[in-house]
Image (cartoon, rainbow, N blue to C red):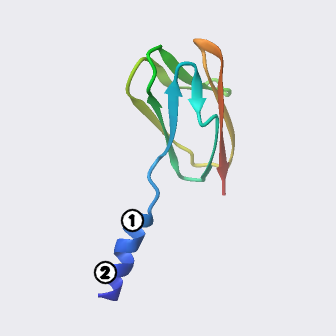
């Protein structure tokens, strides 16, 4: 009985993906901190097309107007990203150990 209760608490406390909203023309939040191994989901909520590219040159999410895209961060560090269609749209994921 105690073991079942402990497992239920762990299941509720287990983190799902962190979320970034893509609105016209911003990432919200612009900076996000997550623990290593956690996923981040970008969700389109505006009317304009946007994409997500990382400063390392890796495209993560193709240009679209709706939907979502997820990336899991397995290494600690700073991951800068931007929208190639709108140069002022930038963001940062800080991954902690």
Mark 1, residue position: 12
The residue at the point 60 percent across, 15 percent down is 84
Residue 82 appears at what percent x and percent y? 63, 23
Residue 78 at x, y percent in the picture: 70, 41
- Tag 2 and tag 1, C-beta contact below 8 Å: no
In the image, 74 versus 44, the foreground residue is 44
Residue holding disc 2: 4
Question: In which quadrant will I find the N terminus?
Answer: bottom left
Q: Which callout, 2 or 1, points to the residue nearer the camera?
A: 1
Quadrant of the frame with the C terminus: bottom right
* Cα distance in 3D space between marks 2 and 1: 12 Å
Q: Residue at x 34, y 84 (%)?
A: 3
- SS at badge 2: helix
Question: Which residue of the protein is positioned furthest toward the right in this rendering?
Answer: 78
Expressed as whole percent of the image width and height from the top left, the position of residue 73 reads 56, 45
Given residues 35 and 12, the one toward you in this image is 12
- Give residue 77's mark: none
| Spot occupied by residue 70 in the image (x, y as percentages of width and height) | 46, 37
Few, some or many residues within 10 Å of mark 2 (<14, 14–19, 20+): few
Residue at (39% x, 65% y) in the render = 12
Mark 1 residue element: helix
Does residue 76 appear to the left or right of 16 in the view shown?
Answer: right
């Amino acid at each position: 009985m105690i073991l079942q209760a402990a497992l239920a608490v762990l299941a509720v406390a287990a983190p799902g993906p962190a979320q970034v909203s893509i609105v016209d023309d911003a990432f919200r939040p612009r900076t996000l901190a997550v623990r290593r191994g956690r996923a981040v989901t970008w969700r389109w909520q505006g009317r304009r097309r946007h994409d997500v590219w990382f400063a390392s040159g890796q495209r993560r999410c193709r240009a679209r107007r709706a939907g979502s895209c997820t990336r899991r961060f397995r290494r600690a560090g700073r991951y800068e990203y931007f929208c190639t269609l709108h140069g002022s749209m930038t963001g940062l994921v800080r991954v902690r150990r």
